[in-house]
Image: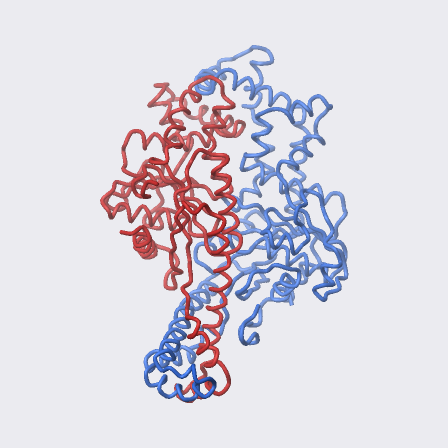
Amino acid sequence: MTALLDLKLVFVTGKGGVGKTTVASALALFASQRGKRVLVCEVDAKGEVARFYEAPPTGFAEKELLPGLFVMTMDTEASLREYLKLQLRIPVVGRIGPLAKAFDFVATAAPGVREILTVGKLCYEVRERHYDLVIVDAPASGHIVGQLAAPQAINDLVKVGLIRSQTDWMLDILSDPTQTGLIAVCTPEEMPVSETIELAVRVREETTVTMSAVVVNRVLHELFGRQEELVFDALSSPDPSEKLAELVGGDPVPVLDAARLAVTMRRTRSTHLERLREGIDPAVPLLYLPYLFTRSHGLRTTRQVAASLGEELGY
Amino acid sequence: MTPARPKRATPTPDGAGSLDGLLAAKEIIIACGPGGVGKTTTAAAAGVMAALHHGGKVLVLTVDPAKRLANALGLEGIGNAETRVPDEAFRSAGLKPRGELWAAMLDTKESWDALIRMHAPDPQTRDEILANPLYKNISGRFVQSHDYIAMERLYEIHSEGEYDLIVVDTPPTRNALDFLDAPQRLADFFSSRLLRWLIVPYRSKLVNVATKPFYQVADRILGTQFLADISEFFILFQSMYDGFVERAGAVQRLLSDRRTTFMVVSTLEGVPLREAEFFAQELTARHLNLGAIVLNKVLPAYLQGAEAATVAEAMKERSDELATSLAPVLGSVDSALGDEAQIRRVLVEVAESFLNFRVVALREAEEKSELGNVPEVLATVPFFDTDIYDLAGLVRLGEQIWD
């Protein structure tokens, strides 16, 4: 399997709330720190990615936010305009108003058109070698399969026409495991793990894209070894905990309770981690990112996650 | 839940009581908010509580429940049909509900098919639509179709008058507001002038000056055959146009009815909370009823204690000395537990863990105090350190929110 950073196009997906955008931003940051020219493309246009680099929201035109790190926000209408200009040389500049309306209509009526313009733009950037690596902050796991399968779906639906002639080269890029990969982000919790396992199956069966890695976010570390846990249990019993209270001059019960909570949380989560390991093809590497206690978002977090990712990737 | 001292780990929820009022007074409760915050579970808990305490027939309409939650509701393996949660499930949890609890899962494809069957003017049109490749695509893959169908199904069930309360959990969307706009968007879509443009040439072979550029571009991009497929699809669909538009209007009215209320669910993490806040503002701006905000997975309040922090600091700083003093005490419990180095590691680890979680707990408390546009009902749900996998678990969660 090709090393993650040697790919040309990486889709990052995951259930809402698991840190998909954090991982996409951090991976891009890490790659750019390794000297690569990276484009991050945000597909669910919210302008969120820029916030992970402490920058104002981006648009369709890419912007270099950090050295070698470019960010753009997908806009299918702008993508169509660019496509028409580059590929068809159709003079639509003056008439973009009605065209946009018409486009919106067709795109709504014929699902797959919007998706193909998104995937098309991404594949175009890869084909033209404008960047070493294109990282996509892709739709949540429920919608990513539809997007990745769009070129194939269009191939089946549209028999002739320009869009049809365009899907072949896109499929070549998407199907090539040395160029394109998918990263699923999850947390060691019930729903995210179940969704990741289901996603792996659907990606294999319904798309031509290869799953390159699963990133497990917010992993809590093990507090105690077996013997240490016995010590901890004894410490929580009446005599020792009274002795401790006396020695430190305050009530240690909340502190001990917090540790108990941490141990239980870790234990619940580890059963889900086991389920994940069993449910995912062993050839797909699992990368673990620690739970961050200090900050939950912003460039500081992106940097920390980038560093952890780098370690997990063996750099 | 198996904390060592449950009393400490369970702070009193604030704002409770009036949430009970919502369960008693409203006919529809829509749970919404960002992904991954426990929306589905909270909606299920609301339904369970209503059935337990208020009686009547209560329906939980859910979108994509976790397997174990589906198990808890006795829903596994069932589809679109409303199914009653057996009394046996309540009995085995030691509960006796006053009313009936029903549950249904939303199957987008099946719901669309049912809608077509209802609106189609004749069997032939119905079969042609159901077999149309574009229709299959729209009903199965079209993201916004989930949003629309969830609201449509809610309307359908409500208008049948079978239930006293319907608790609905909204589908995960790109934008939490999509489902609110879905009925209107569908109506706009069918009323669109462009729709008529698109249908005209295949009906009368008449292409006018206004539509010509559109066809030139569309033809080159999509190909004539595809365009013809689209047209055929819309000609078929047009026969159902009036029904759909009327229906979309009715769904819209139901959403803003006084009997409907919205329950925004979030956690106190920065990103989801911002999204929930925005959502609450939007609901107000649209004159929809924001009934409650439920904050899930909140860390226990004892983590914020200043005295406990001092104790933790001391355990860390003076671990050597403390380990020496504690070794004989622990050794008397069990001689294997008297190892000083081991005791020291445990003390440091315990203290570190407390201080780490304290930062998160403080951040959450701060986020909560900064929360703007708060409705009268604001419930805080403590962090559950185990998963909810049965009815008893849902009741436990419900009690935290409602009692």
Q: Which residue is at the far top?
A: B205
For image coordinates 75% across by 62% down, the residue present is: B97
Q: Position of residue B82 (x, y in %)?
A: 72, 46
The quadrant of the picture occupied by the N terminus of chain B is bottom right
Q: Is residue B77 left or right of residue A7?
A: right
Across and down, in percent, residue A155 comes to 47, 24
Task: Note whether A265 is above or below B252 in the view shown.
Answer: below
B194 to A254, vertically: above or below: above
**In the foreground, A165 or A173:** A173
The blue one among the chains is B
Q: Position of residue B273 (x, y in %)?
A: 47, 56
The colour of chain A is: red
> Residue A251 at what x, y percent from top left?
45, 83
- Confirm whether residue B305 shows in the render: yes
Q: Is residue B274 left or right of residue A314?
A: right
Locate residue B347: give its quadrant: bottom left
Give B273 or A303, whichever is nearer the viewer.
A303
Q: Residue at x 59, y 62 (%)?
A: B377
User: What is the count of numbered marks?
Assistant: 0
Colour logic: by chain
| Quadrant assignment for the C terminus of chain B | bottom right
Q: Is residue B295 left or right of residue B70?
A: left
Front residue of A112 and B55: A112
Q: Is residue A245 visible?
A: no
Rendering quarter of residue B90:
bottom right
Position above or below: B368 against A51: below
Front position in the image: B396 or B244: B396
